[in-house]
Amino acid sequence: MRIGALAEIADIPGPRLSTAASVRARHVRPEAISAATCRSASVAAAVDCVIAVIQSAIPMARIELVDETMVRGFNLHSGTDLPESTHLFLEFHGGPAAVAEQAVAFREIADGFGVAGWQDATTTEDRNALWAMRHNAHHATGGLEPGKRTLATDVCVPISKLAEAVVEAQDLARAMGLTSAIVGHVGDGNFHCGVRVDPGDAAGMARALEFSGRLAETALRLGDTVSGEHGIGIGKQEYMAAEHGAALDWMRTLEAAFDPAGLLNPRKMLPPQG
């Protein structure tokens, strides 16, 4: 695998496009917004809690998972003092009464999974600080093993397999001697690993790329996709045949129909025939 398609910068807010701004302007701001964090002794318990919440049809605006390594990065980067354990970052939208009911319902379910340490973020300032910490996850990994860079990769798995996949990723990183921080959109089964690497260390780079490849193989084995957000590019081309099978030929046909001269980002995503 080559490093080409493995994103090196993740979750860094950039300039807002005017079209996106106009779309957002047409959406009514919720009457009430409330956010919170809570923590769990294990990834499995946190994910099982989220699955139960989704199955209970509690409307959630956001549910983000961060593992203990990522929490350590947050503390180093933002000067926070979160306990270094798996956390869920939450947000509820709606009317005041509905938001309060959603939070209570979530907490009742969370109690059953041993998810505790509830911290409310009801003011605009507190919510902004909470989500700024999450959005700056890539920068926060910089506090882990300073002097290295972050190789970011992601996969997506069925939510029912998310806990298994995250635990497997954590165990694999430890076994390979890698520092990897995990953040995940647990509502859709997508999670990201930020692996600290020294580009000048050939052996270390090889381990990081092997980790990304084995993570992709895990996602395929569990029945989903090698990338939920970071894309295929060059680095994950070799998994396209395993993921899509005969559909790969149809993709090549469509690509040739729309770009017969091969001018639009050529040699990316679809592996060459043969």
Image (spheres, rainbow, N blue to C red):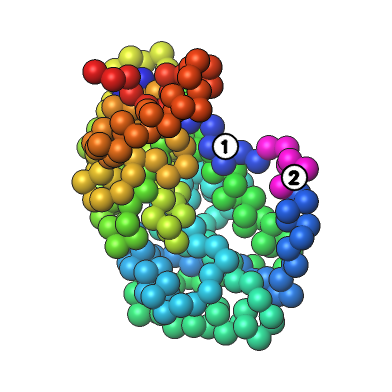
- Residue drawn at 53 percent across, 70 percent down: 60
Please tell me how crowded label 1 is: few (under 14), some (14-19), or many (20+) other residues with Cα within 10 Å. many
Residue farthest to the front, as pictured: 257
Region of the chain picked out in magenta, as a range? 14-20
Q: Quadrant of the C terminus?
A: top left
Please tell me how crowded label 2 is: few (under 14), some (14-19), or many (20+) other residues with Cα within 10 Å. few
Amino acid bearing label 1: His
Element carrying mark 2: helix
- Residue drawn at 41 percent across, 50 percent down: 190
Element carrying mark 1: helix
In the depicted view, which residue is nearer to us: 102 or 241?
A: 241
Q: Position of residue 192 (x, y in %)?
A: 42, 44
The answer to which image quadrant residue 139 occupies is top right
Q: Quadrant of the N terminus?
A: top left
Q: Tag on residue 83?
A: none
15 part of magenta stretch: yes
Q: Which residue is mark 1?
A: 139
Q: Which residue is mark 2?
A: 19
Amino acid bearing label 2: Thr
174 is higher (above) or lower (below) than 38: above
Q: Position of residue 232 (x, y in %)?
A: 41, 32
Q: Position of residue 215 (x, y in %)?
A: 29, 39
Nearer the viewer's eye, disc 2 or disc 1? 2
- Residue drawn at 73 percent across, 56 percent down: 24
